[in-house]
Image: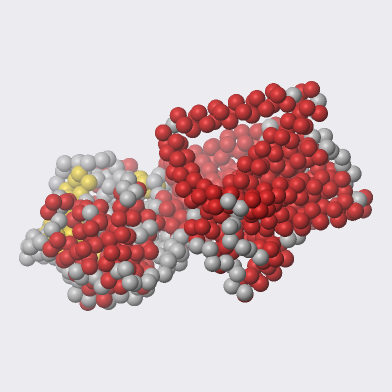
Amino acid sequence: MTEITERDEADKTAGAQPSTAGSVALTSGAGSSPSTNGTPADDDATCPAEDTDAPERPAPADAPEHPSPADDPPPSAARSARPSPTQETESPGRAFGEAPVVVVEPLLPQRIRRSSDALRFLATLAALVGVVLLALVAKQTLNGLERDVTDGTSRAPDLLIGVAGFLAGAAVLIVPAAFAVERVFHRDGVRVAEGLIAAIIGMLGSFVLGEWLAVAGPEDLRILLTGDRTGVEPINTLLTSVVAYVTAVRLARRPTWRGLMWMAIALDVFALFTGAEATVLGVFVTYLVGLAVGYATLYVVGSPNPRPPGGTVVTALRRLGFVPVKAHRIADDAQGSRRYAVVMTDDRRLDVTVLDRDRQVSGVIYRLWRRIRLNSETRRRAIRSLRAELEREALMAYAAQAAGVRTPRLVGTTEIGTEAALLVYEHLGTRELGDVPDDQLTDELLVKIWKQVELLQAHRLAHRRLTGDSIHLDADGEVVLMDARSGEIAAGDLLLRLDVAQLLTYLALRVGPERSVACAAQVIPKQALAGALPLMQRIALTRGTRAEVGRDKELLPELREHILSLTTQVQVEEVRLERFQPRMLVTIIASALAAYFLLSQLSRVNLVEVVATAKWGWGGVALGAAGLSYVAAALMLRGFVPEKLPLGRTVLAQFAGSFVKLVAPAAVSGVAINSRYLQKRGIAPGLAVASVGASQLVGLGCHILLLLLFGYVTGSKAAPSLSPSRGLVIVLLSAAVLVLLVLAVPQLRRMLTSRIRPLFSGVMPRLLDVLQSPRKIIEGLSGTLLLTLAFVVCLDACVRAFGGSLGFTAVAIVFLAGNAIGSAAPTPGGLGAVEASLSLGLTLSGLPGTVATSAVLLFRLLTFWLPVLPGWASFAWLQRHEAL
């Protein structure tokens, strides 16, 4: 009887979950059984008690109930178990003769905001946006599905419809109410309150959003959500509040209740369809809005803290065979894991790292972004289970010990229920390298650091976090490597080279690039240093090092220079670490918008009627003009290259550029293909780029002059509202104001200067070479003018093919403006931007919308889509003959 009483007293102390900030000293016996030990998380684990509908046994009258992570503790129990911020309590050990253990740590918060709830909220919002966009794109398919669902539900027997309607209205209210009663009976009223808050927010939010969609929202979306029927809510307020309530109370953790709730929701949806009170899209949107409100409520309000306190950690240590006498919480590690310093009976010290389950998703957005952006060999798992994290760190620690690396020895691991796990290390009295002043970083110390890293490299171990907080020094000045959790065993060459690049960069920030490379060269082979050379990229470094390098733009170039001075004879292949750059993400989004624009434009055109009534003689003229543009582009390039170029292969190179436009913006594809083509012709890379730049510069000048010229001519012959002098003055004044603004802002001025200086340093000398040959000048200028003229003729012929009639100068202005916009757009070939600008320009010039759209689509078919196949053939032929 005495032993049972002592264990109960220990449980009261170690299992407490205080709610106020501060520090507290707790004690724990070996037999303490805190509330969180052995209880699954309310995050992603499934609670056995929650998985069944067995009645819960109430706590005895003389002992407070131990709250589970999903259930808030009763106020009375919490008050009785919570010590004051300055209180020190003691409890006897489990067995006779065991001393009590004092655990000093800050009071753990009673509720926490879990990153998993925020992540689910963001994922639900993304799904909501995706569903709406997909519905807008596939309107016809959705309308067909809507008709099928309506037809199917209307064929149900009247008796079934009546019973389902009655049961649905009752079930969606009775099931949540019954669950609330059950939770209140088990003293879990806080969870019910959270659900009610989410239900109220869901009802109000869905009502406001529905009213906005019905009154001022997009017309297409309103029709899809309501079926264009009166009395239909775009977002069902009752269903939204029910879903928000179910999400906030985490009903999904209770299989029986979850099944009942899904049956009630299914009956309610069936009743809505039979009564023509909802649409398919409306139900999907309603469900997603309810989910989003529920997860948002959970994150804002917070969840019961499932993290085991220090008393539970001590109990787990005793299960491993250790006999601690006191413990205290120390600073968290670099990845946010809790750490405890524990003193044993023989005065030995241990360092305990606690991995909390709810911390595994912290920073997951950043890790997901890195995982998507980087190549597979450099990225890490964005989300890892608690068990996998424990095994990873333990395996890396054992491997480092076997390799002879000076690192804290791992002496034990265990899980603490389902909510946490711990790793026990022997204590080493060390200090972080980041705390050592720069003037104390001697060459001898730097060499010692590299010797430890060389041991890792020799055993194919990658550390992956060689920074000031993971490199420590002991009392004798020896180097100790910490934080093995981020490491990799059996690492590939790329990861090993990344470690070298990271450490070189970090030490260069502390002692300068020259000393960093010199000390590394005393230990690391020159070949390994050369292997790190192409990895001297900001993206390859750790987060903190990237930030510091960003403030010192010259650091990485200086490091490369010092490495090259040691390894001038070593050839190293370039390494591409980024899977894509952020600019590519913008391109993907812009391409999606462009595709939506094109599809919406096509839906307004009767293609059968257009094809039947078109004058295809003008279509032949447009095709001829489109083909002539490739010859003009070849002449333009030849004119700005002093060396002799064959006309045939140069034309094929222009066709190859049309194939590359499918994956690159219009302003990039031509430059890349032509530069590569000139280099294969034996022209030096710098001169090749300068020649292409010269042609682009002259083409830009001609483009602006032609736009002003045609604008003046059009203004003089058009309506009085288009006065040429006024328009010309406005354009010139706007350009002058823009130039003044750029020159007035130092950052913009430096950016402009940095871009213009290389242009004039390389392009202008190349232009001077071309100016020495009148034949080249004529060829280049004629090609430039012929290229613009061919495109204008092609667009004008497309307009005439569909019965339109505009002045040649008006068509020229529309093309020149649309081409400029397309060149600036980040989408492949200016897709979407060119179509939109040309259609808008032709419509404003007086063409009917259907004629303008048809003409633009034919123009893009002839100049963008049709040349893809011959462009691919030209690309392959040139590559096969080593001309590209």
Q: Is residue 489 above or below residue 499?
A: below
Q: Which of 247 and 432 is in front in this view?
A: 432
Residue 741 in the image: x percent, y percent? 50, 29
Please state if 156 lies on the left or on the right of 494 as rendered: right
Residue under the image location 87 percent in, 42 percent down: 804
Q: In this view, does 136 lie to the left or right of 484?
A: right
Residue 330 screen position, x and y as percent: 19, 52
Between 489 and 16, which is closer to the camera in this rendering? 489
Tag count: 0
In front of the other: 1 or 379:
379
Q: Position of residue 739 (x, y in %)?
A: 52, 31
The structure residue drawn at horizontal position 30% and vertical position 69%, both measured from the top left corner, is 567
Residue at the image position 62 percent from the left and 36 percent from the top: 209
Colouring style: secondary structure
Q: Where is residue 118 in the image (x, y as percent from the top left)?
A: 46, 48
The quadrant of the picture occupied by the C terminus is: bottom right
Residue 39 visible within the image: no
On the rendered structure, is 9 left or right of 224? left
Observer able to see residue 683:
yes
Which quadrant holds the N terminus? bottom left
Q: Is residue 285 left or right of residue 199?
A: right
> In the figure, residue 868 lies in which quadrant?
bottom right
Query: For this rendering, which residue is in front, 781 or 239?
Result: 781
Q: Residue at x 17, y 65 (%)?
A: 447
